[in-house]
Image (cartoon, helix red, strand yellow):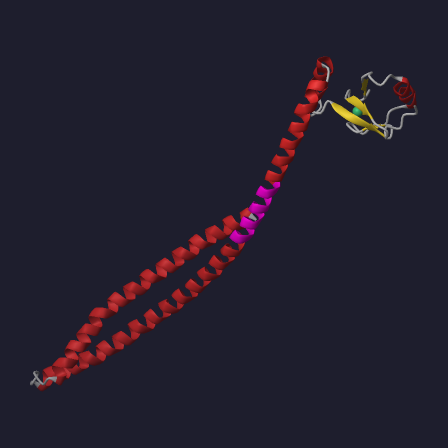
Amino acid sequence: MRGVRAALAADLVAADTAVADLELEQANAESELEPVRQRLVRNQHRIADGTVADPKALGSLIEEVEHLQRRIATLEDAELEVMEQLESAQADREKLRAEAAVLDEELATLTAKRDAQLSELDADVAERQGERAAIVPEIPADLMALYHKVGATRGGVGAAELRQRRCTGCQLEINAAELRQFAAAPADEVLRCEECGRILIRTANSGLRS
Ligand SMILES: [Zn+2]
């Protein structure tokens, strides 16, 4: 989704550029028109106020007025075309902005959801650490050292439950001969998985006959 948002951001930059270019083009068209319009108004006044008495001069003034009117029509057509392009570029940009807003909202929702899950996990970890801190002092130092030594090569987990005759650390089944040994072992003997070396925790579900 972030990739899509980045592509959209690039499209938005391009759309902004297109709009800015057309705005400049329209401003140029307008500044080209302005002096022509002024000249037309000036000439129309001069014809209307009767200060030009010479018929020949008046004739060429009228001719110039007609020429200026055609010139203005041409420039206005060109400006109108630019304005239509500008409107369409602005509409495209609005569409992209709306898409970006929807995506940003979705991203914000997902981010909030992720943050909530992270803080839930943090709370969970803190709770487990509290439980662990309470248990550690009750465990003999040599057993704790063994746990850490095994854990160092087993992703930090040095012990696993023995469940249904299976080591839940490596998921392998304990063979029958070993199971007999485990079943006969005293409760305080440290049992270990032959495969992964983890300390095996016996429970009522371990599958050992007593
Ligand atoms: Zn194992």
68 with respect to 151 (left or right): left
- Is 114 a magenta residue? yes
Q: Quadrant of the C terminus?
A: top right
Q: Residue at x 17, y 74 (%)?
A: 39
Find residue 46 and report its image quarter. Answer: bottom left
196 with respect to 130 (left or right): right
Q: Residue furthest top?
A: 142
**Residue 74 position (above or below residue 56):** above
**Residue 89 position (above or below residue 75):** above
Q: Residue at x 51, y 57 (%)?
A: 99
Q: Position of residue 169 (x, y in %)?
A: 77, 27
Q: Which residues are magenta?
A: 104-117
122 with respect to 151 (left or right): left
Find residue 152 and report its image quarter. Answer: top right
Q: Position of residue 100 (x, y in %)?
A: 50, 55
Nearer to me, 209 or 81:
209
Chief SS of the magenta region: helix
Nearer to me, 137 or 50:
137
Q: Residue at x 80, y 17 (%)?
A: 190
Q: Residue at x 14, y 80 (%)?
A: 45
Q: Position of residue 179 (x, y in %)?
A: 89, 22
Image quarter for ligand 1: top right
- Is 7 a magenta residue? no
Q: Position of residue 106 (x, y in %)?
A: 56, 52
119 with respect to 156 (left or right): left
Count of picture labels? 0
**Residue 94 position (above or below residue 172):** below
**Residue 109 position (above or below residue 122):** below
